[in-house]
Image (cartoon, rainbow, N blue to C red):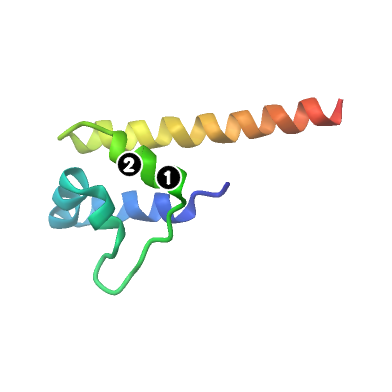
Amino acid sequence: MAHIDLERLVSAGALDYKFRELLLRDPIRAADGYYLDRFRLTSEEKAVLTNIRTNDFQTFVRTIADWITHRRTGAERWLLESAA
């Protein structure tokens, strides 16, 4: 659950305003590639992207960061409960 490609996708949006506009308008199309770079997103990550409804990049990023944090926290909680 590293979400590395999802984080790379957000970083590309932060660096390139045209890519950022595409990311906000059509995140799945944006995930298909950034210049020669491709993003390998899970179906769950794609679902998160398609369910974000905002034209504000900061809100977009915050939503993704919150989701990643929740996923990591949930995984850590599960690992701690399994070890008990």
Q: Which mark is residue 62?
A: none
**As shown in the figure, which amino acid type bears the numbered disc 2?**
Leu
Labels 2 & 1 near each other (Cβ < 8 A): yes
Residue 34 quadrant: bottom left
**As shown in the figure, which amino acid type bears the numbered disc 1?**
Glu
In front of the other: 21 or 40: 40
Q: Quadrant of the image for the C terminus? A: top right
At which x and y percent is residue 83?
85, 31
Which residue is depicted at the point 32% across and 41% down?
A: 49
Taking the image as shown, residue 68 lies to the left or right of residue 49, namely right
At which x and y percent is residue 32?
29, 62
Q: Which mark is residue 49?
A: 2
Residue 50 quadrant: top left
In front of the other: 25 or 16: 25
Which residue is depicted at the point 41% across and 50% down?
A: 7
Q: CA distance from mark 2 to mark 1?
A: 6 Å
* Above or below: residue 44 compared with residue 22: above
Q: How many marks?
A: 2
The local secondary structure at tag 1 comes to helix
Name the residue carrying label 1: 45
The local secondary structure at tag 2 comes to helix
